[in-house]
């Protein structure tokens, strides 16, 4: 789900598009990932065998998955952990679990005590499986530093392969429509992602209130929650937000383009594609002042304290208030930065190099 689907779909598409694969590659993809693939491209790829396989978390009775994986010399799990203690293959595992590398984060304090204990136990178990991987793949340097610091993993076992903008964002012909319910407001702000606690979306009502009372701007937030997540939101949240539901990867560009700005208030990430995608769509980005955002966006985002909603409102009003608006030149520079950050082709080549090493 979430960013894992985007990364998997992009990497698989790039691998399938290659016609020079010297080593046979088998792709075992979930049905969710498959819904985001051009299956004509995948099934016509040379030296690529594709299968659909759903494995849901720690499933020791999934003998089919174990049997299929055990046929291979190397297995790359796009995002782990892979729940195998001593697999008979070289295990390469993508790591994207910030709760493990930032164990003293403020998100724990927001959880009820039983949930806090459960979360700490869950992530401790995850960490034990991550430590069993032969190679770990991360998306930014701060994640590598965290793995060395918190889990004691030797740095030579950790490879940094930058996340990137999907090639989809550069080809408007592939974009799919999304229904954006109309609403009376001055600003249409948005957030793309699941409603996990660390995403910090609970500050949206306070941002909307401050924008209206302190700056005279009536804003509404468009979100992409599941129906279950939306039903769990308090009424104060639903009063200022409109839920369009989960989107496919191909719908995301249209979602961004329909907004005046994107607010990304996350407290905890390894890497999120939302900032890159927002910049690529030339939409103003308002992001939490955290390293995982600053390392990606540099000077191309408007940063705020994610624990102080009024600072977010102030940054938004600074761009849109008093008859102003975003600087087109700055938005173009942000797009160029996002495109140059890394490329899907480069990422896929690095994945393949790790997977086929010694083959």
Image (cartoon, helix red, strand yellow):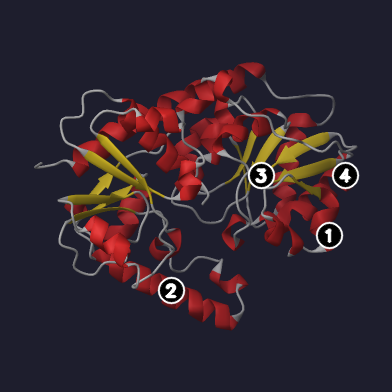
| Quadrant (top left/top right/bottom left/bottom right) for the C terminus | top left
Distance CA(mark 2)–CA(mark 4): 41 Å
Q: CA distance from mark 1 to mark 3?
A: 17 Å
How many residues crowd mark 1 within 10 Å: few (<14), some (14–19), many (20+)?
few
Kindly identify which numbered label has been placed on residue 282: none
- Position of 15 relative to 130 (above/below): above
- Tell me whether the residue at label 2 lies in contact with that at label 1, contact meaning CB atoms closer than 8 angstroms: no
| Of the image marks 4 and 3, the number of the one nearer the N terminus | 3
Q: Which residue is mark 4?
A: 212
Tag 4 secondary structure: helix
Q: Which residue is mark 3?
A: 191
> Tag 2's secondary structure?
helix
Residue at far left of view = 358
Residue at 57% x, 20% y is 172
C-alpha separation, residue under disc 4 versus residue under disc 1: 15 Å
Res 219 → quadrant: top right
Q: Horizontal and vertical percent for residue 298? A: 49, 34
Secondary structure found at label 3: loop
Relative horizontal placement of residue 95, taking residue 25 as reference (left or right): right
Residue that badge 2 annotates: 122
Q: Residue at x 40, y 27 (%)?
A: 41
Q: Label 2 vs label 3: CA separation?
A: 27 Å
**Rendered position, 306 above or below 248:** below
Q: Is residue 173 left or right of residue 26?
A: right
Disc 2 versus disc 1: nearer the observer: 2
Residue matched to label 1: 236
| Label 1 residue SS | helix
Q: How many marks?
A: 4
Label 4 crowd (10 A; few <14 / some 14-19 / many >=20): some
């Amino acid at each position: 789900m979430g960013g894992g689907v985007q990364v998997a779909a992009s990497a698989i598409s790039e691998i399938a598009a290659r016609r020079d694969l010297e080593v046979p590659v088998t792709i075992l993809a979930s049905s969710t990932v498959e819904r985001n693939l051009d299956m004509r491209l995948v099934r016509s790829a040379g030296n690529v065998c594709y299968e659909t396989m759903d494995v849901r978390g720690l499933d020791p009775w999934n003998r089919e998955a174990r049997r299929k994986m055990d046929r291979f010399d190397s297995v790359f799990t796009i995002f782990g952990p892979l729940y195998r203690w001593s697999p008979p293959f070289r295990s390469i595992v993508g790591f994207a679990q910030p709760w493990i590398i930032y164990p003293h984060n403020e998100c724990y304090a927001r959880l009820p005590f039983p949930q806090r204990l459960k979360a700490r136990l869950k992530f401790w178990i995850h960490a034990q499986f991550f430590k069993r991987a032969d190679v770990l793949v991360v998306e930014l340097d701060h994640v590598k530093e965290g793995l060395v610091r918190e889990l004691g993993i030797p740095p030579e076992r950790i490879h940094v392969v930058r996340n990137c903008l999907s090639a989809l964002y550069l080809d408007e012909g592939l974009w799919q429509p999304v229904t954006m319910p109309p609403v009376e407001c001055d600003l249409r702000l948005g957030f793309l992602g699941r409603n996990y606690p660390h995403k910090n979306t609970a500050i949206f009502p306070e941002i909307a209130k401050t924008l209206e009372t302190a700056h005279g701007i009536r804003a509404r937030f468009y979100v992409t929650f599941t129906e279950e997540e939306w039903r769990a939101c308090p009424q104060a949240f639903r009063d200022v937000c409109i839920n369009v539901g989960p989107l496919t990867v191909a719908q995301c560009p249209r979602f961004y383009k329909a907004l005046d700005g994107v607010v990304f208030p996350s407290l905890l990430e390894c890497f999120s594609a939302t900032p890159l995608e927002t910049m690529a769509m030339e939409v103003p980005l308002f992001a939490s002042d955290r390293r995982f955002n600053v390392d990606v966006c540099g000077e191309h985002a408007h940063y705020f304290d994610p624990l102080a909603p009024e600072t977010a409102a102030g940054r938004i009003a600074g761009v849109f208030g008093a008859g102003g608006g975003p600087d087109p030149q700055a938005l173009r520079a942000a797009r160029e930065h996002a495109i140059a950050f890394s490329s899907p082709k480069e990422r896929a080549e690095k994945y393949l190099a790790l997977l086929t090493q010694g083959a």
